[in-house]
Image (tube, grey):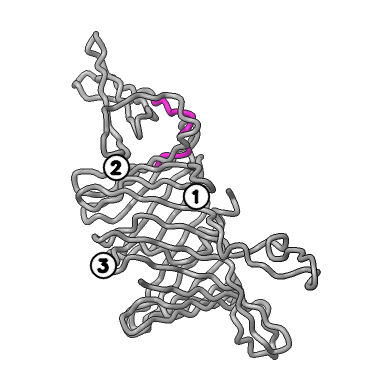
Amino acid sequence: MAIALKLTKLIGLILFFPLFGLSTVTIKIYYVFESFGTETQELKYSKVMNYNKKGLMIDSTIYSHEIPLSKKYIYVDGDKEGLKLQRTYDKKPLLSYRFEYDNLKRKTSTTLYGEKDSVYWREYYKYDDNNFLYKQIRFDPNKAINHEMIYEEKSGNSLWAEKYSYFEDGKGFDLKELYNNYCLLISTYHFDLEGSPIKVKEYFDPSVIFQTIYFHDQVGNLTQETKTGYLGASMGSREYKYDKNNRRVKEIIYNKKGEIEKTYNTIFEDESNVFYDYYSDSLVNFSIIKETRLDSNGRIFVEAILNGQDKLLEKNVFYYDKNGNIIEIKKYDMIRRSASEDYKTPFQVHTYEYD
């Protein structure tokens, strides 16, 4: 599972924005090898994303194209006795994400499937009256123990609901949160002297992997998020700050004790079409710096990854078609390059195909 999650990051840009008129987008990842001056590209992984007529992604599947040696060759008897190359399959599905939306085109759930449609986890999203995401909860249905039917759902869509149970003495109530007919959270409230509910206790089903609460400002910028994990244990929080153009310029990561763990700062140089991301630890030691250059259309053109001593580690170059769609990313490992060598061969190539 850990390897599969790394692949999700490896795939690169995940196109969650609406792509009207398209039904499928395929990202292919090639590993590049150079031997005696000859460049060879080997397809390792691919990601296929399908969209509905509204331009919303409905599923996304990651495939492996690495074929084991035992599957590549078979032994042949007779006149042509010996080993013979045989391709038994072109790709093998590793992970598959499936998405659901409401009538407002807001994503309401994500389910991650493994081999043979086994469910790894399911995730739900709640929105406030301003249509801002305010809660995300992920759980493992295989470990859920509190099953409680909400109501019959003939369409088969996943559901979430809230149920209030008021105490007979009138001093408070329990709020149950149900997802896919499982009671994952129970919050107990008591009324104070002014009649306002005060949360005094919270129960998390053992199946809950994490819950994230989001806070936004008046224009919709995400300003803070807090995360709790197994049985409600704190997993830390994040705080975000913006400039006058509502661009995110700082992200502060706190650990479960409320101490600063990492800080990400972004500096924009609008006249040069460049911005810089600085990643520092709690002691303000710069560990990684990313320089991003934009073209005249405001699209990412080059990304350069540097360490804290301004040594170039990696360079990524982006290419687009005449419609502005990204078609290729070339990744260069600058550490392997010698001082006297003009290293022009990428170690990875990501291609994008649109149907």
Decide: is 6 above or below 350. above
**Residue closest to the far top:** 169
Looking at the picture, does residue 89 appear above or below residue 257? below
Q: Is residue 140 left or right of residue 188?
A: right
The one nearer the camera, 278 or 140, is: 140
The front one of 247 and 70 is 70
The kind of residue on which mark 2 rests is Lys
Please state which amino acid type lies under the numbered disc 1. Ile
Q: Is residue 311 visible?
A: no
| Viewer-nearest of discs 2 and 3 | 3
Return the residue found at the far front: 78
Task: State the CA–CA distance, disc 2 to disc 3.
Answer: 25 Å
Residue 170 is a magenta residue: no
Q: Neighbour class for label 2 at 10 Å: few (<14), some, many (≥20)?
A: some
Residue 93 location (% of width, % of height):
53, 56
Earlier-in-chain disc, 1 versus 3: 3
Please tell me which residue lies in front, 230 or 138.
138
97 relative position to 167: left or right: right
* Residues rendered magenta in the picture: 202-212
Give me the C-alpha separation between circle 1 and circle 3: 42 Å
Amino acid carrying label 3: it is Phe
Secondary element type, mark 1: strand
Nearest to N terminus: mark 2 or mark 1: 2
CB atoms at circles 2 and 3 under 8 Å apart?
no
Is 204 one of the magenta-colored residues? yes
Check disc 3 and report the residue beneath it. 20
What is the x, y in percent for residue 43? Answer: 58, 71
Left or right of 305, for residue 214: left
Tell me what residue is drawn at x 51 percent, y 55 percent. 262
Position of residue 355 measured from the top left corner of the image (x, y, whole percent) = 35, 71
Mark 1 lies on residue: 260
Q: Quadrant of residue 73?
A: bottom right
